[in-house]
Image (tube, rainbow, N blue to C red):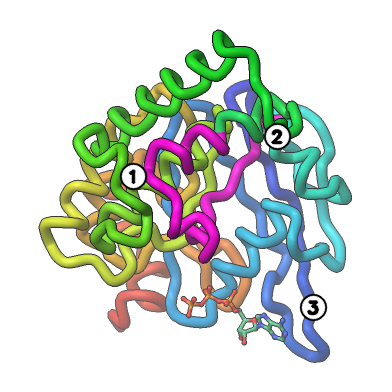
Amino acid sequence: PTPDDLLVVRQLVKRYGGLLATDHADLSVRSGEIHALIGPNGAGKTTLIHQLSGTVAPTSGHIAFAGQDITHQPMHQRVHHGLVRSYQITSVFLRLPVLDNLALAVQARSGSSLRFWQPARAERARYAEAAAVAERVGLGAVLQRTAGALSHGEQRQLEVGLALALRPRLLLLDEPMAGMGPDESHRMVELLASLRGETTLLLVEHDMDAVFRLADRISALVSGRVIATGTPDAIRQDAAVRKAYLGDE
Ligand code: ATP
């Protein structure tokens, strides 16, 4: 590991009965980069993300974040330290306007409990920050629209905003382009690219065009193992990746 490594995964194993969903995986994510995780269906991408966010406990191995061993840390502590995973908006949030959704996320970060009465100044600051995040993710024109009334692409943008409101040092995204048409996916690529330098991204994505346009580095996962990590060009030319993932002989 180098001092630039924000996340370091060493010899991580997740066993389900006889199956190694994660098979001694090694992975490093550098501070400030956009890192994509690719691999065929069932390669173990989602399982790896779950172990990083803290929803699945590894069988063995180590995960370090910002120099601290977090292998057994609960999810809320990881979030507190800046390791944040984006989630699909839940049903309650679908009934709330974009701005209120984001204001709740800002509130969650500050850790103060929701009270009926808030000092007016704190309330204004919270909503101003929520509006800035909405602007940041391209939803500045639909602040009062309920999340449920947004298009599919806009809902995914809001999800990125909800995660950003927590001010992540590392943002984990599981298939941010899933189910999107070309325009929506283009907008998401632009949004994620604009986060470069502001935060660090680790994303799982099946849309290879998006991955190769966006990523600084790519790691290829096959049968739970990271078989290669490199720049998009290096991954494109990697013989093991071509054979295992792209189907080349
Ligand atoms: P996809 O691209 O299709 O989403 P993936 O790369 O994300 O796939 P995972 O969903 O992580 O792959 O699954 C990896 C392997 O682990 C698969 O064989 C899957 O069936 C298995 N697996 C995942 N979760 C469990 C579980 N809770 N119990 C048993 N097996 C599981």
* Residue positioned 75% across, 32% down in the render: 113
Q: Residue 19 in the image: x percent, y percent?
A: 73, 86
Residue located beneath label 2 in the image: 114
Going by the picture, which residue comes out furthest to the left? Answer: 183
Asked if 174 appears above or below 242 in the picture, the reply is above
Q: Is mark 2 within 8 Å of ligand 1?
A: no
Q: Earlier in the sequence, mark 2 or mark 3?
A: 3
Going by the picture, which residue comes out furthest to the top? Answer: 121
Circle 2 packing at 10 Å, graded few (<14), some (14-19), many (20+), is few
**Kind of element beneath mark 1:** loop
How many badges with numbers are in the image? Answer: 3
Front disc: 2 or 1: 2
Circle 3 packing at 10 Å, graded few (<14), some (14-19), many (20+), is few
Amino acid found under the numbered disc labelled 1: Ala
Of residues 118 and 7, the one drawn nearer to the viewer in this rendering = 118
Asked if 2 appears above or below 47 in the picture, the reply is above
Residue located beneath label 1 in the image: 215
Going by the picture, which residue comes out furthest to the bottom? Answer: 18
Left or right: where 36 falls relative to 122: left
* Residue positioned 51% across, 41% down in the render: 163
Going by the picture, which residue comes out furthest to the front? Answer: 117
Q: Which residues are magenta?
A: 81-105
Of residues 182 and 19, the one drawn nearer to the viewer in this rendering = 182
Amino acid found under the numbered disc labelled 3: Arg
